[in-house]
Image (cartoon, rainbow, N blue to C red):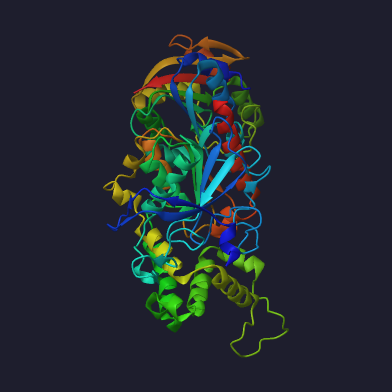
Amino acid sequence: MNIKQNIKTLIVEKPLKLDCGQTISNFPLAYETYGSLNNEKDNAILVFHALTGDQFVTGINPVTKKDGWWSYAVGSGKSINTDKYFVICANVIGGCMGSFGPSHENPKTKKIYGTDFPVITINDMVNAQINLLDFFGIKKLFSVVGGSMGGMQVLQFISNYPDKAKTAIPIACTSSHSAQNIAFNELGRQAIAADHNWSDGDYNSKNIVPDKGLAVARMAAHITYLSKKGLQEKFGRKLQERDDLKFGFDADFQIESYLRYQGSVFVDRFDANSYLYITRAMDYFDLVKQFNGNLSDAFKNTKAKFFIISFTSDWLYPTQENKDIVIALNAVGANVGFVEIESDKGHDSFLLNVPDFLKALKNFLDKSYAEKH
Amino acid sequence: MKPEYKIISDLIEKDAKVLDVGCDDGTLMEFLKTNKNANIRGIEISKKKVQICIAKGLTVIEGNAEFDLKQFPNDSFEYVVLGQTLQAFINPEIVIKELLRVGNKAIVTIPNFGHWKVRLNLLFKGTMPITNSLPHDWYNTPNIHMCTIKDFVRFSKIINFKIFKSLALINENVSDINNSNLIFKNLFGELGIFLIEK
């Protein structure tokens, strides 16, 4: 497997006590960087990826050979301009792109962890990634940025390390996973568990993969990332390479074919157990509860300048949930800006070419960076 | 830049924490930042204008003053500015009360419906007045609660807030409004500028 040759890994020696009670140490944290760190070490941006993302933010992903997940936003001259900023992104723990996760071998049993891997949380992910600051000798990040689960990590990061970032940009996220969010994640997990190949998580030892279950999980999730209007405009009732309905259960409609394709390419790059662990981490995320019902307390010690962004057609993490974060920040007098971007592209808007979003992100970063120079 | 921005700026102390409600393209915010070193935030309903403000490096929240002032705790700001939009709200009374809850002081400017041109317009044309500061037709105007300088002074007594300072803008010149010249200023003032307190 020469795939691993393309993956940079920091071995975190310092013990990390997980929320579940277990302590891990000497664990791998896979990361990638773009651009260069300046002499003052004040131009670093830590990007957090979402559920199915990884550390390969932009350019060609050396493992999948496809464009990085945030190629629209990150790169030379782009919103997160790598000519100017030093971008760091790590694969979350629990993930499957080199960081400590369920597909790793348990040193005690010499077997792949599978579901013996400890349940991790957003808090754990963030506490693992803080080690990157010491590794690069960065005292304070210029910014922490992320969409969806990446946005949850932004919120948790500022709450845990209030003076470690000058600016914070949580995008299309929530401070507390809703019942609907949990419901969709549970649907995905049950699809995986219903695949006979899953074998209670022990598929690695049998050299099989629960690809059917994982593909269904991805298909269901994918629908939640799009809007009804967006789907209707892109696919409508268009038929897939045929003139008439075939009165069967093949993919007659383009939308069916599209979803099947999304499912099939996903299983090639993603580990089913990682999918279980990461969706669980999202479901457990409740920053409101962490602060006994008062979200404002999560931010009372920070001087970070916030910029919150939501999208009109995002029904998975709707504007109101993003606004709740704005309200909590205003209640403690934090410096917070907010904009809702007009887009038909649903929750996925933050990953796509949405000019108003990309412009706002760029302007906020560049103006904030100019302020201190 | 609108002529009243300089007047508003003169009413504000240096380094004050200020909220500009309906901050438009952020021109006043920038002016107060430069001239008064104000720690300034804005609320703006138009997405386009919020984008302009972000491009200027201003901290602005997209929102509606009628619903989104609620989120600020009492006395969050030393000054809250409401420029020429009071007449566009469904419930100006609630807005004024919210301004004075969120800020220690508020600066409210109103286009004066009592101006002689407005009066003549209605008197001689018999149609809803259209002037430079009120350019809309009756059916497409956002201004649903027009008032005069005199109305606003009365309003202060009815809903019980103090007018600390009242100024009239006439041909880009500013002058004090008091009880003895109110009738005159209400006829010639294009804009009323009021510094108010609870």
Q: Residue at x 57, y 32 (%)?
A: A369
Q: Residue at x 37, y 30 (%)?
A: B102
Percent x, y of residue A161: 38, 40
Q: Residue at x 65, y 63 (%)?
A: A65
Q: Is there any visible trace of residue A178 in the rendered image?
A: no
The relative height of residue A319 versus residue A98 in the rendered view (above or below) is above
Relative to the observer, which residue lies in front, A177 or A214?
Answer: A214
Residue A87 image-quadrant placement: top right
Percent x, y of residue B118: 60, 25
Percent x, y of residue A301: 35, 34
Relative to the observer, which residue lies in front, A63 or B172?
Answer: A63
Relative to the observer, which residue lies in front, A167 or A296?
Answer: A167
Residue A303 image-quadrant placement: top left
The relative height of residue B105 versus residue A1 in the rendered view (above or below) is above
Tell me if B129 is positioned left or right of B36 in this view: right
Percent x, y of residue A237: 64, 76
Tell me if A67 is positioned left or right of A281 in this view: right
Tell me if A362 is positioned left or right of B98 in this view: right
